[in-house]
Image (cartoon, rainbow, N blue to C red):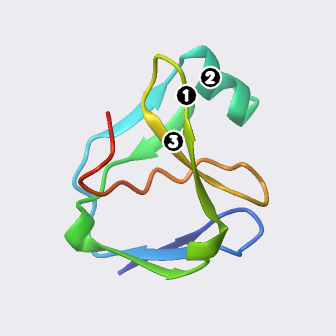
Amino acid sequence: MIHGSCLCGGIRFEFTKPAGPFELCHCTRCRKVTGSAFFSGLHVLIEDFRLVEGHELITTYEAPIARTARLSRLLLQPMRLAGAESSR
């Protein structure tokens, strides 16, 4: 089991295995939100994922001409938690 959280610890999650691939995104939006040259992300199948705590802290941001982003309401940290309704 792999455990993770947002920066403040308000949102906690776990997953059994990564589905891959590990990606680095260099788009302007990802560089801005991370304050670095790229955003790193790992894909996980929804059936292998469990949100442990902080569901109420996650909100949806519909970005123009981009994928839907799930964000921590406290830090605006990306949380790409997607169900069947997400766009990618």
- The reply to whether the C-beta atoms of the residues labelled 3 and 1 are less than 8 Å apart is yes
Please provide percent x and percent y for residue 55: 56, 74
Quarter of the figure with residue 74: bottom right
Sooner in the amino-acid sequence: mark 2 or mark 3: 2
Where disc 1 sits, the SS reads loop
Which residue does the image show at 71% across and 74% down from the upper left?
A: 9
Q: Is 68 positioned to the left or the right of 28 in the image?
A: left
Residue 69 numbered tag: 3
Please provide percent x and percent y for residue 15: 35, 73
- The reply to whether the C-beta atoms of the residues labelled 1 and 2 are less than 8 Å apart is yes
**77 above or below 53?**
above
Please provide percent x and percent y for residue 38: 59, 26
Q: Give the camera-side residue of 56 and 54.
A: 56
Which residue does the image show at 25% across and 47% down from the upper left?
A: 20
As shown in the figure, which amino acid type bears the numbered disc 1?
Answer: Ala
Which residue does the image show at 26% across and 65% down from the upper left?
A: 46
As shown in the figure, which amino acid type bears the numbered disc 3?
Answer: Ala
- In the picture of the structure, the residue carrying the numbered disc 1 is 63
Where disc 2 sits, the SS reads helix
